[in-house]
Image: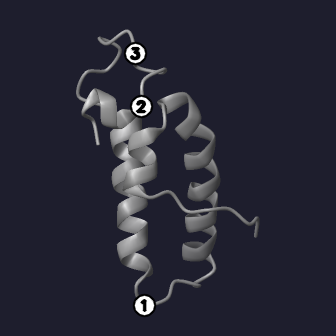
Amino acid sequence: MPSFQRLTVEEARSLTRAELLPRIEEEQKYWYARIHHCRMKPGDDRDFRTFNDIMHIAINPSGFLTDAGYWTKPLGELGEL
């Protein structure tokens, strides 16, 4: 499994959607592999829930494509996360 850093809410607030997308894709692969290979451990549910929250906010924001900074402004600046 590739080595990477899991996303945190604080980090996601400082990144733009364009920067988040590749990170979300990699972490999604990580979590789905853990789930499908029955490798989830106690406490993983909390981390997986945090990842899902970040992913859903980044993918389905409240102001979808109405803000000119959709791809270029950090989520924290847009008030999304």
Q: Which residue is mark 1?
A: 42
Left-right relation of 79 to 76:
left
CA distance for labels 1 and 3: 38 Å
Q: Which residue is mark 2?
A: 74
Secondary structure of the residue carrying tag 3 is loop
Q: Please name which of the two marks, 1 or 2, marks the residue nearer to the observer.
A: 2
Tell me what residue is drawn at x 40 percent, y 37 percent: 58
Residue 21 or 19: which is nearer the viewer? 19
Q: Position of residue 44 (x, y in %)?
A: 44, 79
Q: Residues within 10 Å of mark 2 (few under 14, many from 20)?
A: many
Q: Position of residue 77 (x, y in %)?
A: 32, 30
Left-right relation of 60 to 34:
left
Tell me what residue is drawn at x 36 percent, y 34 percent: 75
Q: Please name which of the two marks, 1 or 3, marks the residue nearer to the observer.
A: 3
Q: Residues within 10 Å of mark 3 (few under 14, many from 20)?
A: some
Locate residue 19: give its quadrant. top right
Q: Position of residue 9 (x, y in %)?
A: 37, 54
Q: Which residue is mark 3?
A: 69
Q: Position of residue 64 (x, y in %)?
A: 31, 20
